[in-house]
Image (tube, rainbow, N blue to C red):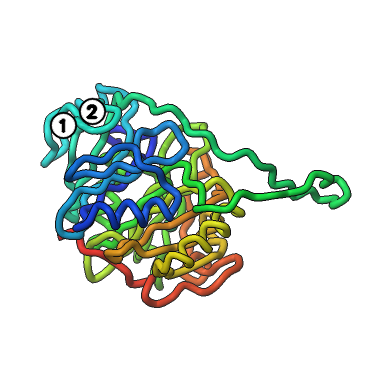
Amino acid sequence: MAEIKVNKFVYGRLQSPNLDQAEEFLTSFGMMRAERTATKLFMRGTDPEQFLHATELGEAKPLAFGYFARSEDDLKALTKVPGATGIENVDEPGGGKRVCLTDPNGFRIEVLHGQAKAKPLPMPEYKVNWAEDKFRRTELMRLPKGPAMVKCAGHGVITTTDLKKTLQWYRDTLGFISSDDIYVEKKENVIASFNRINNGPEYVDHHVFFALQSAKSGLNHISYESRDIDSIFIGHNVMKAKGYRHTWGIGRHILGSQVFDYWYDPWNRVHEHWADSDVLNEAAGSKLLTPEEAFNNQWGPDIPQEFLGHTVPFQ
Ligand SMILES: [Fe+2]
């Protein structure tokens, strides 16, 4: 029985040695500044969360993932998890309260409740009209240029030296359920796992958390939902023109079926744009698959070796 069931992946928190460079990268990636102090930078998307990316000034390293709890009682329940903090007031955009946990890899997990909603930002109006009958598409399609439009945080991905313990912890503590587990040779030998939020009968994204067995524990990537597929392609050219380093994409995954595009920030942390996910509910259950069934694309370039083994150690 899980301690609680979080209901949203809200942000990734990274430490970076230069806030100007961080803001420039994230702006080109399609985020907007929510707040900046001498030592912290908060970036947002168009959805009503106050921020979906936090940067703290310092030596480059991953710091935390942030999730929303459903109630303050849930925060209270989390204070009983070994190593948890008490309930703290949050002195960051939108305020609220939080409990900080440490996962089995030494990575910080922040669970918040009561953050004030931000005003959603308007997306430029345009219509992508892919009518099956082309003669029904009578309006001209004109897409705005600029960075990919980022709406919200999508999922966080880590590598771990102990996948079994890690999955158990996330499922027991945050209430995640498996969408797809990937095994090699024997079915008990799970090497990677996609996990979603448990919202009962409500449909949720195929995954908010993915973990892979690896020689080192660390951050593999943080993913952000973009407005649509066109926006990802338009944003790709903005990132390319700015000279940012690309790793994989544009393609469409099999598991989750998202269209994806992966970019390194100036300190080797991968940020993903995605759009158009499969959604599942609790009743959809979970599957056990081989890497051949799981990791190929539906279309797009093959996964590069450098990205398969990519990790930025937690400590
Ligand atoms: Fe991803």
Residue in view at x 84 percent, y 52 percent:
134
Element on which disc 1 rests: loop
Residue at the spot of label 2: 75
Neighbor class of circle 2 (other Cα within 10 Å; few <14, some 14-19, many 20+) is many
Real-space Cα separation, disc 2 to disc 1, in angstroms: 7 Å
Question: Residue most toward the right?
Answer: 135
Q: How crowded is mark 1: few (under 14 residues within 10 Å), some or many (20 or more)?
A: some
Horizontally, is 226 left or right of 176 in the view? Answer: right
**In this rendering, is residue 53 above or below 203?**
below
- In this rendered view, identify the residue nearer to me: 4 or 234: 234
Q: What residue type is labelled 1?
A: Thr
- Which label sits on residue 213? none
Residue 100 image position (x, y, % from top left) = 18, 38
Rendered position, 297 above or below 132: below
- Report the front residue among 107 and 76: 107
Q: Mark 1 points at which residue?
A: 79
Residue 103 in sight: no
Q: Picture coordinates of residue 121 (x, y %)?
A: 48, 33
Q: In x, y percent, where is residue 191?
A: 35, 65
11 or 191: nearer the viewer: 11
Label 1 residue near ligand 1, CB within 8 Å: no
Mark 2 residue CB less than 8 A from any atom of ligand 1: no
Residue found at x 19% / y 58%: 17
Q: Position of residue 28 (x, y in %)?
A: 43, 55
Q: Where is 57 relative to 118, above or below?
A: below
Report if residue 130 is visible in the image: yes
> Horizontal placement of 262 versus 128: left or right?
left
Query: Mark 2–mark 1 contact, CB under 8 Å?
Result: yes
